[in-house]
């Protein structure tokens, strides 16, 4: 893996930002601890020096220089505070008492406070120690210096500084290491998706994004991309199937239509033969348009385009409109239509496609039911679903053929002369899938019973009557014949 590519990843940049934020968040509390600790030590040291020099000044006021010399001598004894520094000198800085032999020469003044270095002997070795002190000039010209050894305070300060430095260094190393490892991991996942995407772009449409099963963001992204690719492949397959179906099923009628017209033109001029040819041409054209419209509506349902036009509707109102259209057709064939349609059967659906599916079911039932028979339609609902049932008293479909009859251009029946293209039930199945419904073919005893179970939709906003008055009825059962 190339290092520049690693550093260019968003993950690595995010790690760097987090590193800066985390570093600042560490420096601030460490700085506070450092300032508070050192400040507290300095305050205690200063307070002790001020209290000590004030006490010696009182000794001088009470007992004079002799008393002060005695007090300084007692306090600077070896048995006293080893960190306390005393030095009493005359006006010429000649020592009078204390544990310093000479006046310090490397003093650094800071207001009334001075700092200097002394050598302390310990374990036969001399070690430089820093001293913080305050100087008081007495009325007789003598000079009193009182200080404290701040070597321990400097050690504490050094330890805090070193701890902060090591902590920051360790944080930097850990964050950079974590950033590199995380970026390498992220980059591998992104490269895998990029590689697969490139293969898909190059034409390998069957490839899918890798999923590791961890359930992380990359897996969820890959799952969504795979669903999208499945949908794209399904749409392309549906489009290919539609074009193949159009080429397959329209070639015959168009060829037959062309042959009939050419045959009429080759014969002797005859009005009756011309009229017969035109009537046959109109019949074939209607058949071609019916097939074409059915294929278009089926492609619309299978591709999911109709889902964008879905809205809350009463399936009973849609079914009632279709029944009103087909009742006159059934009466002409001597059939009885039995409709049991409840109100408030609300689903989320595409009104045009649902009406087309119901029309195809009624059209098939009417075509295959002998005179004197009955066609039934019912819309029922329960707490979870809405059920549309269409039955007839015709010959029905054998259980072995009920799965195959849902395919395109498959016709199963005792009378091949019955008009149709074999697309009706396949269109109904596509509409049911679009609405996430289930389609079942059963025995109506005698005849065929078709049941579609739809998920129940939102509650109705209007009554069934207001919807019926406010919604237009279907103009015609175009493309409804199977």
Image: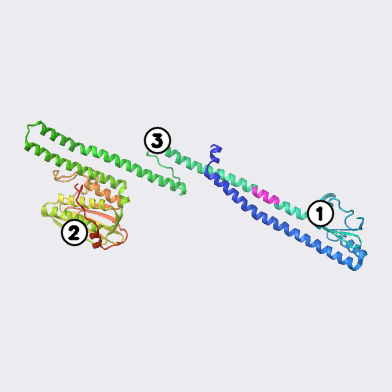
Q: CA distance from mark 3 to mark 1?
A: 80 Å
For the point 13% across and 35% down, the residue is 261
Q: Pointer 2: residues within 10 angstroms few (<14), some, or many (20+)?
A: some
> Can you tell which quarter of the image residue 416 is in?
top left
Q: Which is in the foreground here, disc 2 or disc 1?
A: 1
Q: Is disc 3 in contact with disc 1, using a CB cutoff of under 8 Å?
A: no
Q: Is residue 396 left or right of residue 199?
A: left
Q: Position of residue 165 (x, y in %)?
A: 67, 49
- Extreme residue in the top direction: 266
**Counting residues from the N terminus, which is met first, the one under dot 2 or under dot 1?**
1
- Taking depth in this image into account, of 405 and 192 the one nearest to the observer is 192
Q: Is residue 62 placed above or below 95 in the rendered structure?
A: below
What residue sits right under mark 1 in the picture? Answer: 109
What residue sits right under mark 3 in the picture? Answer: 202
Coloration of the structure image: rainbow
Q: CA distance from mark 3 to mark 2?
A: 55 Å
Q: Which is in the foreground here, disc 3 or disc 1?
A: 1
For the point 15% across and 49% down, the residue is 367
Q: Position of residue 109 (x, y in %)?
A: 81, 54
What residue sits right under mark 2 in the picture? Answer: 339
**Is 163 colored magenta in this rendering?**
yes
Q: Secondary structure at mark 2?
A: strand
- The region drawn magenta spans 161-168
Q: CA distance from mark 2 to mark 1?
A: 110 Å
Q: Is residue 222 left or right of residue 458?
A: right
**Is 228 colored magenta in this rendering?**
no
């Amino acid at each position: 893996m190339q290092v520049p590519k690693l550093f260019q990843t968003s993950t690595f940049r995010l790690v760097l930002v987090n590193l800066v934020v985390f570093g600042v968040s560490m420096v601030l509390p460490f700085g506070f601890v450092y300032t508070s600790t050192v400040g507290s030590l300095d305050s205690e040291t200063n307070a002790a020096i001020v209290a000590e020099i004030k006490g010696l000044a009182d000794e001088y006021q009470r007992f004079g220089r002799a008393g002060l010399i005695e007090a300084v001598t007692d306090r600077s004894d070896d048995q006293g505070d080893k960190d306390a520094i005393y030095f009493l000198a005359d006006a010429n800085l000649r020592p009078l008492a204390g544990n310093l032999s000479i006046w310090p020469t490397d003093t650094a003044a800071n207001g009334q406070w001075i700092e200097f270095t002394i050598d302390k002997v310990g374990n036969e070795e001399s070690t430089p120690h820093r001293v913080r002190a305050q100087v008081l000039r007495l009325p007789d010209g003598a000079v009193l210096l009182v200080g404290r050894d701040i070597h321990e305070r400097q050690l504490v300060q050094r330890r805090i500084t070193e701890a902060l430095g090591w902590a920051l260094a360790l944080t930097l190393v850990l964050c950079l290491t974590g950033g590199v490892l995380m970026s390498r991991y992220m980059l591998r996942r992104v490269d895998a998706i990029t590689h697969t995407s490139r293969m898909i772009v190059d034409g390998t449409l069957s490839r899918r994004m890798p999923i590791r099963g961890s359930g992380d963001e990359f897996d969820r992204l890959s799952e969504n991309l795979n669903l999208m690719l499945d949908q794209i492949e399904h749409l392309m397959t549906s489009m290919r199937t539609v074009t193949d179906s159009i080429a397959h099923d329209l070639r015959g009628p168009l060829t037959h239509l062309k042959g009939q017209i050419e045959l009429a033109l080759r014969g002797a001029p005859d009005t009756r033969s011309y009229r017969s040819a035109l009537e046959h041409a109109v019949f074939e054209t209607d058949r071609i348009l019916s097939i074409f419209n059915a294929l278009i509506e089926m492609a619309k349902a299978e591709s999911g385009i109709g889902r964008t036009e879905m809205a809350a509707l009463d399936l009973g109102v849609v079914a009632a409109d279709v029944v009103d259209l087909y009742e006159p057709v059934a009466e002409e064939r001597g059939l009885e239509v039995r409709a049991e349609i409840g109100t408030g059967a609300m689903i989320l659906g595409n009104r045009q496609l649902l009406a087309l599916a119901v029309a195809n079911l009624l059209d098939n039932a009417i075509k295959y039911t002998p005179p004197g028979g009955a066609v039934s339609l019912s819309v029922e609902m329960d707490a979870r679903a809405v059920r549309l049932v269409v039955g007839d008293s015709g010959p029905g479909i054998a259980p072995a053929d009920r799965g195959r009859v849902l395919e395109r251009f498959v016709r199963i029946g005792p009378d091949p002369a019955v008009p149709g293209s074999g697309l009706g039930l396949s269109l109904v199945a596509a509409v049911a899938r679009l609405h996430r419904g289930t389609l079942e073919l059963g025995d109506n005893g005698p005849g065929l019973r078709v049941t579609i179970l739809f998920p129940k939709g939102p509650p109705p906003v209007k009554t069934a009557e207001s919807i019926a008055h406010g919604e237009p009825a279907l103009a015609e059962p175009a493309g409804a014949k199977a």
